[in-house]
Structures are given as structure tokens and as C-alpha cells.
Amino acid sequence: MEGDVQAVGEIARALTFPAQPEEMGCYGSFRVRPDATPSPVDSIERVFRLWTSNQDANDPMVQEYLNQLRRISKAYSFSESGVKIDCLWYWDGDGTLVYTFRTLDGRQRIIENSDCKKDYCWRELDSG
């Protein structure tokens, strides 16, 4: 998936949560597409590392934060037009929704919306 991060994020959300038009996926509806398979949250460990990259990974508070994310997160995988898409979300007062996938040219892309009830809070995470 190529293009503007806001558009790509909302397309990915619509592909993941095929809800009724009045329901926003990962906010008004959590029904994922039928062919999506649950993934172990650890499969998206790279995203957790990105979230804490500017902190000491051995710090007990960072470890507790990561453990909390593992407990409250949901993760699914599916393919669309030959592209494998991993989706991760959690709610801790606000909802966070993250997608990881490879573009057709092989570049890894990680995008995040840290306020799921909004369709304009998408940002690109450094995929290194």
C-alpha cells in the first residue's frame, strides 16, 4: 500500500474492520474480517521496541510498560492483493491502532493512529 499515511491508514482500517458505514473500526466495531487470523502479540514485538526506542530497555518501568501492552493488545494478520498485513491495537483510555506491511517495492512500512476514534491521527513510524 502506497500513498499518504492518512489515506493508507483509513484504507487499512476499512480492510481490517468491514463494519457498517456508521461504525468506525477499532472504535465502534471490533469485528475483524473473516479471513484475519489472530497473531501472537509477540509477533509485533518490533512495534513495541519502536515505541520505547528512546528508553533503556532494561529499565523495570519500561519492561512493565511492555508487559502491560502485551496483556491488553490484540493482533491479527491477513493478506490483501498479495500483501501480508499485520494489525495491532490496544485501548488504555485512548485506542492505538498499528499496521505493519511491506510495500510492493519491498519497503517495510509501519503506521500508527494513537487515537482510534479519529481518522486523521495517522503517522509513519520509523521502520529502520
Image: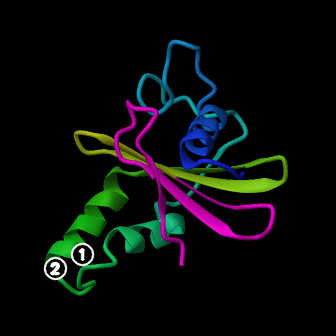
The residue sitting at 34% across, 40% down in the picture is 115
**Amino acid on which the number 2 mark rests in the picture:** Pro
Where residue 7 sits: x, y (%)? 60, 39
Q: Is residue 122 left or right of residue 4?
A: left
Instruction: Name the residue beneath numbered marker 1.
Output: 63
Q: Amino acid at mark 1?
A: Gln
What percent of the width, then of the height, locates residue 116? 39, 37
Residue at 53% in and 42% down? 6
**Can you identify the residue that label 2 sits on?**
60
The residue under the point 30% across, 68% down is 66
How dense is the environment of label 2, judged by Cα within 10 Å: few (below 14), some, or many (20 and up)? few
Residue 113 located within the stretch drawn in magenta? yes
Res 71 quadrant in image:
bottom left
Between 112 and 73, the one nearer to me in the picture: 112
Which residue is the extreme one toward the right?
82
Q: Which residues are magenta?
A: 99-128
Residue 112: x and y in percent read: 46, 52
Rendered image coloring scheme: rainbow
